[in-house]
Image (spheres, rainbow, N blue to C red):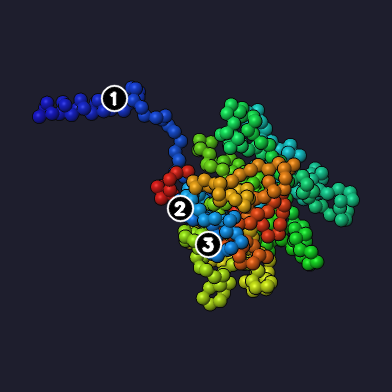
Amino acid sequence: MKRNALFFFCLVAIVLASCGSEEKGQLLGVQNRPAWNGINPYGMVYVPSGTLTIGQSDQDVFNTYTQKPKSISISGFFMDDTEITNNEYREFVYWIRDSIALDMLGFYAGEDDFGNEPLDWSEDVDYSYDEGYGEDLEDMYYQGDMRMSDTERAFDTRMFEYSYKWIDWKKAAHSKGTIRSELLNDETVNVYPDTLVWIRDFAYSYNEPMARNYFWHPAFDDYPVVGVNWDQARAFCHWRSHMWNSYKGADEPNTEEFRLPVESEWEWAARGGRELAPYPWGGYYIRNAKGCLLANFKPGRGNYPEDGGFYTVKADAYFPNDYGLYNMAGNVSEWTESMYHPAAYDHVHDLNPDLKYDAKDDDPESYKRKVIRGGSWKDISYYCQTGTRDFEYQDTTKSYIGFRCALTFLGRSLNDF
C-alpha cells in the first residue's frame, strides 16, 4: 500500500513538473495566440456555404448566351440584411465632416508610437455660430456668391473627401518579384451623395422635392441611400472596416474587411437557398395568391404606386427571403464588386467565381462597367429576377442604385462555433 502511494506521488510530481517545463523539442505551435470566436456583425445575416447553378431561372432567349447556366460553389459570408440606408451612410458623411473640423480646430490626441498625431474623437464639435466653434470653422461653409443669402450656412460638400489605400492582390499574385509599394493604390473619393440624380435621371419630370429632401429629411432615414457611385460604395466599405478595427481591443486580431459582394455571392444570397428560384421568395410570380405584389418595382405599364411605393420604400419593407435578406428584388438595384462582361460565365472559375478589373479614368467606357443586381423601383419585374444580370458604369450615380456590404466568414461554417 505504501509502495502504491509512493508511486502515485511520484507520478503527480512528474506531471506537475512537465506542466511548468519548456516545450522540450515538441512541435506545439506558437503559444499565446489571440483567441478568435468569430463575430456576428450588427445588421448582418449569415449566408452559408453552398452550391448553386447560376444563370437565368426562367426562359430568356435573348440572354441565353450571356447568362449560361453554370454550377458553382460559394463559401460562407455575412451580408447586410437591408440595403445601406440614408441614415447609415450619413454616419459616414458626418465622420468625414467631423474629421475635417477636428483637424481645423487642432484637436489631436497626442503622438502615437509611429509618430502620427491621431485626431481626438473625444472632443464634441459644436457647429453653432454663437456658442460653438462656428466662427472658427467658417471655411467649411459656402462663401460669397456661393451663398443663397448672407445668413445661409451650408457645408461645402466638395471638401468631404475620404482617402485610403488598398492592395492589388491579383497583381501581387501574378507579378513575381514586385515590391510592395507597387501594389498599393491610393484612393481619394468625395463621399457626398449626388442628390441631383432625382432630377437628372428623369427628363420633363418634377422630382425636385426628392432632390432637396431624400438624403437629409428624417422622413427618409430608413430608406436606401442612392446617388452613390461604385467608388463611393467601396470607400464606405473601407471606412466601415476601419471603424470596426478601431473599436476592438488592441490585442484582438482584425477581422476580414467589409466589401461589396461579388456577383455570384449576391445571386446565391438572393435565392435564399432555393435552387433555380426566379425570385427571392421562391415563386414564379411577382404576386402572391391574394394578388398582392411582393416587391417594389414598376408594375404593368407604369403603375408605380400599385406596390405600395411611388419611389423607393423603407429598406426593410416586404417580407425577407429565407436567409433573412430584405429587398433582394426591387427597391434599388445594388452594386457588386464584379466587372461586367457578357461572357463572364464562360471564363470565371467554379470556386467563388468573380471577375475584377481596376478601371482607370482614361480606360474605355466598357472597362468601367460593374454588375448591378436586383432591379429597382423604376424597373419592370424582369430585372427583379435572381438570375438577371445588368450593369452600370462605376463613375455614375443613379436614383435607383444603392448597395449593401458583405463580409467573408473566417472558418468552415458558423455552425462550428
Q: Residue furthest bottom?
A: 290
Give the residue pinned by disc 1. 17
The kind of residue tagged 3 is Ser
- Residue 305 on image: x %, y %: 66, 72
Left or right relative to 9: residue 396? right
Q: CA distance from mark 2 to mark 3?
A: 15 Å
* 104 lies above or below 317: above
Sequence order check: which comes first, mark 2 or mark 1?
1
The crowding category of the residue bearing disc 2, from other C-alpha atoms within 10 Å (few below 14, some 14 to 19, many at least 20), is some
Observer able to see residue 238: yes
Q: Nearer the viewer, mark 2 or mark 3?
A: 3
Q: Earlier in the sequence, mark 1 or mark 3?
A: 1
Task: Identify the element where label 1 is drawn.
Answer: helix
Residue 37, given in percent of the width and then of the height, sits at 44, 43
For numbered disc 3, what is the local secondary structure?
loop
| Closer to us: 243 or 300 | 300
The amino acid sitting under disc 1 is Ala
The location of residue 76, given as percent across then percent down, is 48, 49
Q: Which residue is mark 3?
A: 57
> Residue at image x 69%, y 48%?
366
Mark-to-mark CA distance, 2 and 1: 51 Å
Disc 2 vs disc 1: which is toward the camera? 2
Secondary structure category for the residue under label 2: strand
Q: Is residue 127 above or below residue 3?
A: below
